[in-house]
Image (cartoon, helix red, strand yellow):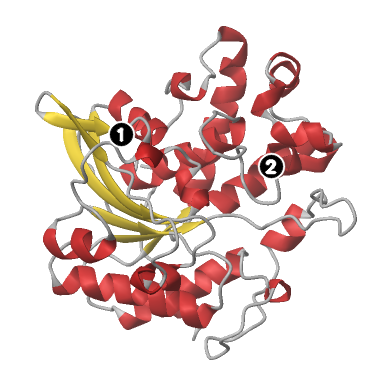
C-alpha cells in the first residue's frame, strides 16, 4: 500500500447547523462502552444535537468477533441505545446492563440492515490487521448493501499497559514510544502479538488506507477518531506542566485520575489517566474520570465537526469553577489535534 493512498481530503462535517438529529451506531468493546455513551449524548445535546445511538458492545471483543457474535452465544453482547421514550425522541438507557428497556436497533445484523445511520463507528481491539480489516470491511459492505449508512469512522483508541508478573499490577507505559511505534506485521499475517504494536497510530492509519482502497467510491473516505493522538498531546502537556488546574483536580477529586493510586506522578504523563491496564475509568466503567472526558469529547468533536472549547463538562463531574481552566486546556488540545489531522474530515475554517 502506498503512503499516498492514505492522504484523505478534509470534507464537511456531518452537521451543518444546530437543532439536528444525528443517528450513530457504535461497534466496539469496553473502550467504547467506558466513554459512557449517555455522557457523549449529553455533549451533543449541549449543542442542540439530538444524538440517537445504537451499539453492539462486548468486553474484550475484536471487530471480527463482533461480526461473528452468533458463534459465541455464551458471551455477553450488549446493545446500549437511546431507547427510553421522552416526548418526541428517545433518551439513553440509564442502566443498559440490566436490559430492562426494549431494544430499538439491536445487534449489527439488524441495525445495519433495517435502520439508517448518519455514521457507523467501529473500534478495533487486540487483533491482527488481517482480522481487523476483515471485520471492518464486512460491516461497511453490509451497511452499503442495505443503504444503512455511507459514512464510517474508525475509533483509534490507545495502547495497553503491561502487568507485573508477580504483583499483577500495571506497569507504567512509555506512551509516546508505543503509540508512535511502527506496526510490524502485514495484512497477510493472521496472528496477533503485542510485539506487533497493533494499538499504534501506524496500525490505525494502515487500516484506514486498506479500507479506503477497498471502497474508493464512498462519498467521503473512511475517517478516524484519533483518541490515541489526543492522548499523546495530553501526555506531553502533563509532563511539561502545561495543563493548568490538574494539581487542583488531583487534590480535590483524585478518583478523576485513577492512575495516581498506582504509584504514578505527573512525570508519568497519561499513565495517571489509566484505571488499570487499558481503561480510563474503573470497572464497571460508569464513573466519570478526566480520561473519559477526553475520549468522549474527542468523539463529539470528530463526529460533529465542532470546536468543543467552551462547552460544559458537567456530565463528567467537571463543572466546578476551579476546574474550568483545565477543562478549556483539554478542549483546546482536542480541537488542535482533531482539526489538524487529515484523517478526521474536520478542518479549522
Q: Quadrant of the rendered structure where residue 117 is?
A: bottom left
* Image quadrant in which the C terminus is located: top left
User: Which mark lies nearer to you, 2 or 1?
Assistant: 1
Q: Nearer the viewer, residue 135 or 10?
A: 135
Above or below 24: residue 47: above
293 to the left or right of 184: left
Q: Which residue is mark 2?
A: 274
Q: Residue at x 67, y 70 (%)?
A: 197
Q: Residue at x 39, y 35 (%)?
A: 40
Numbered label attached to residue 168: none
Q: Which residue is mark 1?
A: 93
Q: Name the spot of residue 39 as percent of width and height, x first.
A: 41, 31
Going from N to C along the chain, the mark reached first, 2 or 1, is 1
Q: Is residue 14 visible?
A: no
Q: Nearer the viewer, residue 313 or 238?
A: 313
Q: Which residue is outermost to the right? A: 166
Q: Residue at x 17, y 38 (%)?
A: 21
Q: Name the spot of residue 196 as percent of width and height, x first.
A: 68, 76
Q: Is residue 287 visible?
A: yes
Amino acid at each position: 500500500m502506498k503512503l499516498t493512498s492514505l492522504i484523505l481530503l478534509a470534507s464537511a462535517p456531518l452537521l451543518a447547523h444546530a437543532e439536528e438529529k444525528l443517528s450513530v451506531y457504535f461497534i466496539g468493546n469496553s473502550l467504547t462502552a467506558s466513554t459512557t455513551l449517555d455522557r457523549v449524548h449529553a455533549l451533543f445535546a449541549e449543542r442542540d444535537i439530538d444524538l440517537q445511538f445504537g451499539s453492539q458492545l462486548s468486553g474484550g471483543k475484536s471487530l471480527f468477533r463482533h461480526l461473528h457474535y452468533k458463534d459465541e452465544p455464551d458471551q455477553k453482547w450488549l446493545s446500549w441505545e437511546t431507547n427510553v421514550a421522552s416526548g418526541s425522541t428517545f433518551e439513553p438507557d440509564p442502566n443498559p446492563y440490566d436490559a430492562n428497556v426494549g431494544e430499538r436497533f439491536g445487534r449489527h445484523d439488524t441495525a445495519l440492515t433495517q435502520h439508517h445511520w448518519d455514521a457507523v463507528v467501529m473500534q478495533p481491539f487486540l487483533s491482527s490487521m488481517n482480522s481487523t480489516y476483515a471485520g471492518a470491511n464486512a460491516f461497511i459492505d453490509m451497511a452499503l448493501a442495505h443503504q444503512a449508512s455511507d459514512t464510517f469512522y474508525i475509533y483509534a483508541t490507545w495502547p495497553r499497559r503491561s502487568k507485573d508478573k508477580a504483583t499483577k499490577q500495571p506497569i507504567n507505559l512509555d506512551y509516546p514510544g508505543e503509540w508512535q511505534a511502527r506496526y510490524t506485521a502485514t495484512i497477510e499475517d493472521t496472528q496477533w502479538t503485542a510485539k506487533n504494536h497493533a494499538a499504534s497510530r501506524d496500525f490505525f492509519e494502515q487500516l484506514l488506507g486498506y479500507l479506503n482502497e477497498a471502497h474508493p467510491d464512498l462519498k467521503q473516505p473512511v475517517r478516524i477518531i484519533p483518541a490515541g493522538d489526543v492522548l499523546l498531546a495530553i501526555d506531553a502537556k502533563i509532563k511539561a506542566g502545561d495543563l493548568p488546574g490538574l494539581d487542583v483536580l488531583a487534590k480535590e477529586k483524585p478518583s478523576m485520575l485513577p492512575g495516581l493510586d498506582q504509584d504514578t506522578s505527573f512525570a508519568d504523563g497519561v499513565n495517571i489517566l489509566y484505571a488499570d491496564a487499558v481503561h480510563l475509568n474503573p470497572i464497571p466503567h460508569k464513573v466519570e474520570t478526566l480520561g473519559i472526558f477526553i475520549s468522549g469529547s474527542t468523539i463529539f468533536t470528530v463526529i460533529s465537526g465542532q470546536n468543543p472549547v467552551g462547552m460544559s463538562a458537567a456530565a463528567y463531574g467537571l463543572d466546578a469553577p476551579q476546574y474550568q481552566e483545565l477543562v478549556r486546556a483539554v478542549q483546546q488540545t482536542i480541537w488542535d489535534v482533531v482539526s489538524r489531522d487529515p484523517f478526521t474530515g474536520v478542518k479549522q475554517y
